[in-house]
Image (cartoon, grey):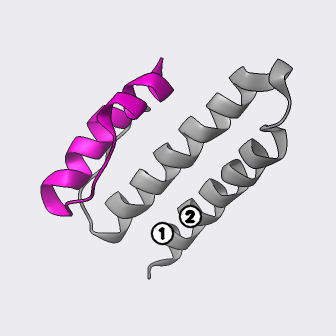
Amino acid sequence: MKTITREWLARAAEDLAAAQALLLRADLTNVVAFHAQQTVEKTLKAVIEEYDLGLMKTHSLTRLYELVRSHHPVIADMDMLDRLES
């Protein structure tokens, strides 16, 4: 695994840990959603880096997923990706 891939995944793991730590706080739902979105975005960018799929300067989970899916099929809940983006 490339160093840059490991770095993206490490940052994604930090966001996931933050989301999990805040999950029980009903008053912080928006912060949990933010960290969940960041987790998915950074994970997709890790895949893009690992497989040299090109440079994608976007925060759109849908666009990132479309790039990844065309080269490395994975199952994704597109409705959830849309909800995380909004």
Q: Residues within 10 Å of mark 2 (few under 14, many from 20)?
A: many
Using the image, determine if residue 61 lies above or below residue 29.
below
Residue 58 seen: no
Left or right: residue 6 versus residue 47 is right
**Residue closest to the far bottom:** 1
Q: Position of residue 15 (x, y in %)?
A: 69, 48
Say if 32 sits above or below 67 in the image: above
Report the Cα–Cα distance between label 1 and label 2: 6 Å
Note whether residue 71 is visible. Answer: yes
Identify whether 55 is placed above or below 53. above
Q: Are marks 1 and 2 in contact (CB under 8 Å)?
A: yes
SS at mark 2 in the image: helix
Q: Amino acid at mark 2?
A: Leu
Q: Quadrant of residue 73?
A: bottom left
Q: What residue is drawn where x is 38% and y is 25%?
A: 82
Q: Quadrant of residue 65?
A: top left
* Residue for point 48% across, 55% down: 43
Q: In this rendering, is residue 2 above or below 27?
A: below
- Indicate yes or no whether the magenta region holds residue 44: no
66 inside magenta stretch: yes
Viewer-side residue, 29 vs 38: 29
Secondary element type, mark 1:
helix
- The quadrant of the rendering that contains the N terminus is bottom left
Instruction: Provide the residue designation for mark 1.
Output: 5
Dot 1, how many residues are within 10 Å of its Cα: few (below 14), some (14-19), or many (20+)? some
Which secondary structure dominates the residues rendered in magenta? helix
Q: Which residues are magenta?
A: 61-86
Q: Specify whether 1 is left or right of 74.
A: right
Q: Residue at x 86, y 30 (%)?
A: 25
Amino acid type indicated by mark 1: Thr
The residue that disc 2 covers is 9
